[in-house]
Structure formats: C-alpha cells, structure tokens
Amino acid sequence: MLHTITTANQSIIDPKLISAQDAVLFWQNGVIIACQNNPILNTVLQNTQHCYVLDNDINARGLKEQIDPRVKIINMQQVVDLTVNYYPQINWE
C-alpha cells in the first residue's frame, strides 16, 4: 500500500496503519513531517523503511537541509513509479 501524506497536521496520521511492506510519500505540506527530529516520522520509520519525499515540494518550502536523511528524496517520475508499484493508495490530508 502507498500512504501519501499531504498535510502537516500530525494529529490525523495514524502510524499504526503503516506496515513494513508499505511505502510512505510525503508531499505538498506533508514534507514538513519529513524533517529531522519529528516524532511522527520516527514512528513511521519504525514501521517501514520505504519513506520518500518529493523534491519539488521540499525545494519550494526551503526545507532540503532539514529533511531527515532516512527519507529518500525523489522526483515526480519516481512518484509515478511508486503509484505503479504500491496499490492501493491512502491519502492522509
């Protein structure tokens, strides 16, 4: 399953629903959660190592230096590949 997180509102994200075989994509305002020392991100990374963040969105917000190094920075073509490889998809917004 692919979990797409488009919100910075951490209270609506339930990391217990994310399993080891799932992938998580942080994009739009969700990239804020992919920053270092975020407790929700740490919990998500305990559940799955497949965490990604969209490069255009972190660059637009000036967050490239703050992104946790355990989260892989990807481009839009790689996002398309994620949607092909992980099905179904849940959006946290």
Image (spheres, rainbow, N blue to C red):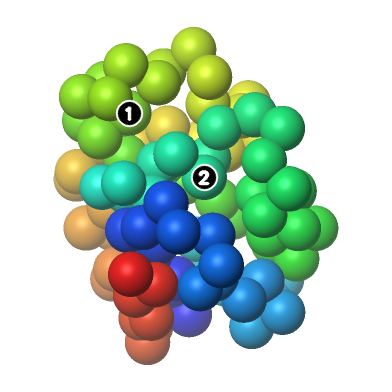
The residue type indicated by label 2 comes to Ile
Give percent across and percent down for residue 49.
68, 53
The picture places residue 23, in percent across and down from the top left corner, at: 52, 64
Q: At 26% across and 47% down in the image, what residue appears?
A: 28
Coordinates of residue 24 in the picture (x, y in percent)? 50, 61
- Would residue 29 appear left or right of 39 to someone viewing this image? left
Q: Which residue is mark 2?
A: 33
Could you tell me which quadrant the C terminus lies in? Answer: bottom left
Among the two numbered marks 2 and 1 on one chain, the one whose residue lies closer to the N terminus: 2
Q: Secondary structure at mark 2?
A: helix
- Residue occupying the point 72% across, 32% down: 37
Q: Which sits in the foreground, 20 or 40?
A: 40
Measured Cα–Cα span from mark 2 to mark 1: 11 Å
Residue 58 image label: 1
Locate residue 13: give its quadrant.
Answer: bottom right
Q: Nearer the viewer, residue 45 or 39?
A: 39
Q: Are marks 2 and 1 in contact (CB under 8 Å)?
A: no
| Label 1 residue SS | helix
Residue count near mark 1 (Cα–Cα under 10 Å), binned few <14, some 14–19, many ≥20: many
Q: Quadrant of residue 69?
A: top right
Would residue 8 appear left or right of 16 to someone viewing this image?
Answer: left
